[in-house]
Image: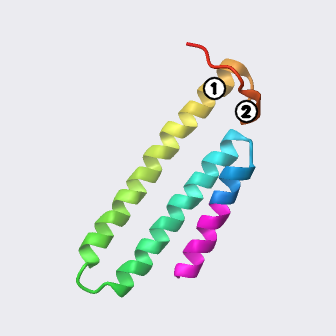
Amino acid sequence: MVVLASAVFSVGLYVVLVRRDLVAILAGVELMLGAANVFLVALASVAGSFTALVESAGALVIVLAAAEAAVGLALVIAAVRRSGRSRTDEFTEVSG
């Protein structure tokens, strides 16, 4: 399971580093958070006495992923509506 989590995390990291579309980057971050959750499940199966602690950390990762998806998608939608662009390399200026 650790190998699976590492592979999924690597794919998510690759997507974040290579892709330039905002939605794809958001999906890559979600993949990395999912891989962290799979790793926590693998850790819970190995750690006998710390199972409750690992399960609560897994629930925290799920809540964090949901909040990140909501806020990230809202930011992406606001950026696209404001500028009409959805690629990171097209955003060259920052204005207040």
Residue range highlighted in magenta: 1-12
Q: From the viewer's perspective, is 18 left or right of 10?
A: right
Residue 17 location (% of width, % of height): 69, 51
Residue 85 location (% of width, % of height): 74, 27
When the figure is inspected, residue 51 is found, relative to residue 79, above or below; the finding is below
Q: From the viewer's perspective, is 1 left or right of 60?
A: right
In whole angstroms, how far apart are the C-alphas of marks 1 and 2? 8 Å
Q: Mark 2 points at which residue?
A: 86
- Residue 87 forms part of the magenta stretch: no
Secondary structure beneath label 1 = helix
Identify the residue shown where x is 56% and y is 55%.
Answer: 30
Secondary structure beneath label 2 = loop
Identify the residue shown where x is 42% and y is 58%.
Answer: 62
Which numbered marker is on residue 47? Answer: none
- Kind of residue indicated by mark 2: Ser
* Viewer can see residue 44: yes
- Categorize mark 1 by other alpha carbons within 10 Å: few (<14), some (14-19), many (20+): some
Mark 2 and mark 1 in contact (Cβ < 8 Å)? Answer: yes
Which numbered marker is on residue 79? Answer: 1
Residue 76 location (% of width, % of height): 61, 33
Identify the residue shown where x is 29% and y is 65%.
Answer: 56
- Residue 3 forms part of the magenta stretch: yes
- Categorize mark 2 by other alpha carbons within 10 Å: few (<14), some (14-19), many (20+): some
Going from the N terminus, do you reach mark 1 or mark 2 first? 1
